[in-house]
Image: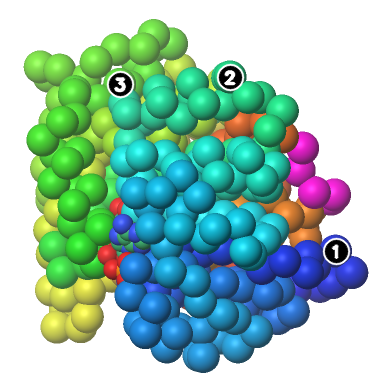
Amino acid sequence: MNEQSKMSNVPRQPVLLIGGSGVVGAETAKTLRQLQPELPITIGARNVRKAGVIADQIGRADVVQIDLEKPDLGLSGEKKFSAVAMFMKDKSLYSLKYAQNEGIPYQNISGAAFELSPEIAYFVHRPTSAPILMNSYWLAGTVTLAILSIAREFSSVNSINIAALLDEQDIGGPAAYDDFKRLSKAGPYALMLKDRKWNWAIDDDRMSQFESVDGKVFHGEAYSAPLDVAGLAAATNANSIRFDFTLGETASRRRGESFSIETIIEISGKQQTGSFGNFRYEMVHPKGQVPMTALGVAVGLEHLLGLVGGSSIKAGLYFPEVLIEPSYMMQRLKEFGTNISQKK
Ligand SMILES: NC(=O)c1ccc[n+]([C@@H]2O[C@H](COP(=O)([O-])OP(=O)(O)OC[C@H]3O[C@@H](n4cnc5c(N)ncnc54)[C@H](OP(=O)(O)O)[C@@H]3O)[C@@H](O)[C@H]2O)c1
């Protein structure tokens, strides 16, 4: 499937997916297997029986029991890995320190923008230890990379508004629910870029209105968790960027089908064709948030390991848009069932 990957670079040591038996982790294991048939994978979790089911399903995989209370993750140094991906908020950050000690790439998706200072501190103190991909983006960077791909059709971008509608039946497993509760309780107002200045989204800026793909109007609230606004601000010359979120019933469910995930993107600016105005794009996955998030993590791992896009990545602190070519993600999103359309 992956003509761009370099099979000769496939590491002998497995990629460790900590939480690879959960809702997103198991889907990531399957996506990674599809993208990289030869890559050895280890599923890490507390419940090894459940992890074993996923390992058997994907093949070329085994299982380890993980103890996040221990600095060596309970592994006693017996096994070596080529990379670590996390599918829960690791409150001790032992997993990050483990990757730094081993000098192997690390990726996480469960932090919020306002709680990343400990990870940044660990990196700043050991900047040459390991490549760290901070992928706590909406749907693990897939949406921001799609936006950057679309932005190439513009000669200038004035503003980017992202509105995410997550179906209330699509929150995920217990780890995702814990994150949702923690972030809702601890989260500050969101930071937004407004007229080239970073502002808290308070008062009139806090709430927004957007239309679902079938025209139903939702009230979204500026959301402080994902890193997308910061990443897009650094990657584009946009004057204003905001991210709004709401939990509700997606259009597919209103039609009597299963839940989906909807992300509505509005870009104002001038297109290469000379058209000027506000352009609306709809990104919908008919199976909800899990396949898109899984793809984001799997593609992140491919890049960290140098299986796509060049040689393996040097130690450093990375966001997805500095590692992954937007058109590559766009192509994969379509292959893995995401519908992306422009609306007048
Ligand atoms: N950035 C994004 O766009 C995005 C999108 C979706 C989800 N997420 C995040 O992804 C994470 C996973 O979500 P999910 O829905 O897949 O949750 P989940 O189904 O509850 O999966 C959690 C996984 O972690 C393992 N686990 C939990 N606590 C553990 C511990 N202390 N030590 C070792 N393993 C542990 C679980 O297995 P055991 O119980 O057997 O240990 C399971 O495999 C959440 O943090 C969620 O917020 C991020």
Disc assigned to residue 186: none
Which segment did they paint magenta?
310-314
Which residue type does callout 2 highlight?
His
Tell whether position 89 is magenta.
Answer: no
First reached walking from the N terminus: tag 1 or tag 3: 1
State the separation of the CA atoms marked 3 and 2. Answer: 26 Å
Q: Position of residue 79 (x, y in %)?
A: 64, 64
Can you tell which quarter of the image residue 239 is in?
top left
State the separation of the CA atoms marked 2 and 1. Answer: 30 Å
Can you tell which quarter of the image residue 214 is in?
bottom left
Residue at the right extreme of this rendering: 8
Asked if one can make out residue 240 in the rendered structure from this viewpoint, the answer is: yes
State the separation of the CA atoms marked 1 and 3. Answer: 40 Å
Q: Residue at x 67, y 61 (%)?
A: 80
Q: Secondary structure at mark 1?
A: helix
Q: Position of residue 332 (x, y in %)?
A: 61, 66
Which residue type does callout 3 highlight?
Leu
Query: Residue 282, relative to residue 79: is it above or below?
Result: above
Which residue type does callout 1 highlight?
Asn
Q: Nearer the viewer, residue 244 or 176?
A: 176
From the image, tell me which residue sits under label 1. Answer: 9
Q: Position of residue 304 (x, y in %)?
A: 69, 50
From the image, tell me which residue sits under label 3. Answer: 191
Asked if the residue at tag 1 contacts the one at tag 2, i.e. Cβ–Cβ closer than 8 Å, the answer is no
Q: Nearer the viewer, mark 2 or mark 1?
A: 2
Disc assigned to residue 125: 2
Q: Residues within 10 Å of mark 3 (few under 14, many from 20)?
A: many
Q: Is residue 10 left or right of residue 171?
A: right
